[in-house]
Amino acid sequence: MLESETYRIPYLGLKNGIHKYEFDADETFFSKFEQSLLLKAKVNYEVQLEKLSTHINLEIDLVGLVGTDCDRCGADLTSQIQGDFRVVVKFGDETSDLTDDLIVLGPSEHFVNLDQLFFEFSHLCLPVRNVHGNEFDCNQEALAALKKFKIKEKDEDIDPRWAALKNLK
Ligand SMILES: [Zn+2]
């Protein structure tokens, strides 16, 4: 799992209760992930950490502007993303990645690492189809070329984000 010193919260020594943090990420951050679809990005994350004696509740509120390739014409496309995600952090014998909104931290961990969460949640906010709102806004030359090419292609319409997420591990 990728970890950075920028996107993590030390939880040892934190008092029980609510703590708030704010982070910004741009394309430099996303470029560290091979599966990233975000070529340009300016995303803000508001993180609320609620420390309880048994576990931690995380709430991540993100808003941003991201640049991807248009799925239809391949040209640059800017999309607005926004989302609100909750994660429960528990303590166990072994650290585990995010599964069903739950993270387990092993006894040797000192930080809640946010890299993977920021990456996954930002991609989950992308529109179902990453395309220009109107076909006329697409790059017409690219479209014409693609149409010729696509006649031969099978109609296998897997959302690239799900494909990317499946390859995370
Ligand atoms: Zn397009």
Image: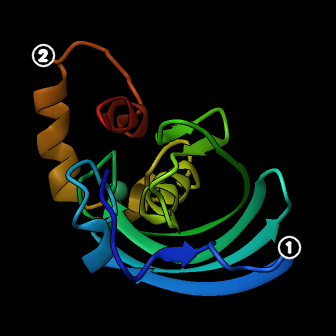
Instruction: Measuring from the top left, give residue 79's x and y in whole percent.
Output: 50, 68
Q: CA distance from mark 2 to mark 1?
A: 60 Å
Earlier residue among tags 2 and 1 = 1
Residue 132 vertical placement versus 143 (above, below): below
Write the residue at 75% across / 71% down.
49
- Quadrant of image for the C terminus: top left
Q: Position of residue 123 (x, y in %)?
A: 48, 53
In the figure, 109 relative to 79: above or below? above
Q: Is residue 106 above or below residue 108?
A: above
Q: Position of residue 119 (x, y in %)?
A: 44, 59
Q: Does label 2 point to a residue whose CB lies under 8 Å from ligand 1?
A: no
Crowd tier of the residue under label 1, counting other residues whose Cα lies within 10 Å: few below 14, some 14–19, many 20 or above? some
Whether pointer 2 and pointer 1 mark residues with C-beta atoms closer than 8 Å, the reply is no
Whether residue 29 sits left or right of residue 127 in the image: it is: left
Picture coordinates of residue 70 (x, y %)?
33, 55
Residue 16 bears which disc, if any? 1
Residue that appears at 11% across and 43% down: 145
Image point 56% across, 76% down: which residue?
10
Query: Disc 2 designates what residue?
Result: 152
Amino acid under disc 1: Asn
